[in-house]
Image (cartoon, rainbow, N blue to C red):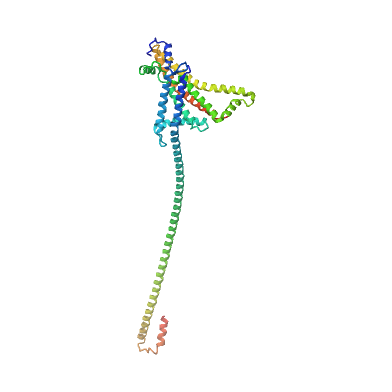
Amino acid sequence: MNINFTLISQAIAFSVFIWFTVKFVWPPLLRAIEERQKTIADGLAAGERGRHELELASQRSSDVLKEAKQRASEIILQAEKRATEIVEEAKRTAKEEGDRIITGAKADISHEVFSAKEALRQHAAQLAIAGAEKILRREVDAKAHADILIAIEEDLK
Amino acid sequence: MASGTELTPTSYIDHHLTYLTTQVSEGSFWVLHVDTLITSVILGVISFGFIWLIVRKATPGVPSKSQAFVELAVEFIDNEVKNTFHGNRHVLVAPLALTIFIWVLMMNAMDILPIDIMAWITENVFGLHNWKIVPTTDVNTTFALALSIWFLMIFFNLKVKGFGGWMHELFCTPFGKSPLLWILNLLFNFIEYVSKPLSHSLRLFGNIYAGEIIFLLLGMWAATGVSGTIFGSILGAGWAIFHILIVTLQAFIFMMLTVVYISMAHESH
């Protein structure tokens, strides 16, 4: 354990190694590490931003979906309303048409009845005249008895 | 152990604690421990060269496995420094801490290599009879590191506080500004400034040296017979495993103390 020149030589070697580390080892490595730290920080920030955007987008999409659902239900409601309206209208039209047909038919029938009655009346009058001619067995002066004939016709009405 | 003399416990330990020396100039100071210097320089060149090769191709993108490994070490040290030192650490303190941690760790780690196998290799492959493989068991190494840091401490004291500011700190802290306390303050600071490099270097030296001595003692036990070999091997393995902790811990402590000392030089009271 004696102090000698080795001390000085070791101190010199030590200073050389310090110089070497300070000059050549530390700076490039530090630069690489710092650059990587920056890259990682940027990446993390970008990830965070992406996450935020995703959140917004999903919120937006759910909003759109909700709106679409609402619209769809509104449309369905309207369609249902419209369908019932159409059915109602069809019913009404059908009823009107039916009524009209019935009315027409009734008018036709009453007309037929009237003309049948008329014809029947004519026949009955002729029959009555013929009957009367036969009963009287004589010439009947149509002119002289016209008032009687008209009275009979009037009665048959 | 191919020593020419008869093998005794004393000669065994002596052999393992003898440096390969060379006389640089006249006088007892001008002796160089060649093994300490060359081993430590080789270790430094290997580790810093390895780191440099990886760092040269460092990308900010996805790192390769080796780059990730280096980054792991660098970020660990950078974090420790950041918690302690509040200036711009990238200029000197953080790279300095990295240098110290890696280098001291590597030098300490030589202690885990089986001491007699390494001695056999240096003797029979390189033809060197004495070669201490662990540079941190040489007090010169730890003092060199601690004194370099001590001078850096003085330098930063002067740079940050100026000469006047430093003198003011030496005379007026920690007890107070009163002129009566000047001598006491100065004495206190003197003790502190002396004890810092001493404790800094001797802590590392003591731990690693003691570890090496224990390996030597276990090696001696292994030479006493079959049971000695068995127990020596088991305990040697256990001690080596425990030593992994000591090696790392001492490198870490040395680094942390460096950062703390230099931070203290930057902060005025």
Q: How many marks?
A: 0
Q: Is residue B154 above or below residue A122?
A: above
Q: Position of residue A140 (x, y in %)?
A: 37, 89
Which residue is depicted at the point 45% across and 46% down?
A: A53
Q: Is residue A1 visible?
A: no
Q: Nearer the viewer, residue B37 or B80?
A: B37
Q: Is residue B180 visible?
A: yes
Q: Is residue B176 above or below residue A62?
A: above
Which residue is depicted at the point 41% across and 27% down?
A: B47
Instruction: Write down the quadrant of residue A106 in the picture.
Output: bottom left
Q: Quadrant of the C terminus of chain B?
A: top right
Q: Position of residue B199 (x, y in %)?
A: 52, 21
Q: Nearer the viewer, residue B65 or B138?
A: B138
Q: Position of residue A87 (x, y in %)?
A: 42, 61
Q: Is residue B238 above or below residue A62?
A: above
The residue lying furthest to the top in this view is B6
**Residue A40 falls left or right of residue B182:** left
Q: Nearer the viewer, residue A104 or A84?
A: A84
Q: Quadrant of the N terminus of chain B?
A: top left
Q: Position of residue B263 (x, y in %)?
A: 53, 29
Q: Nearer the viewer, residue A70 or B21?
A: B21
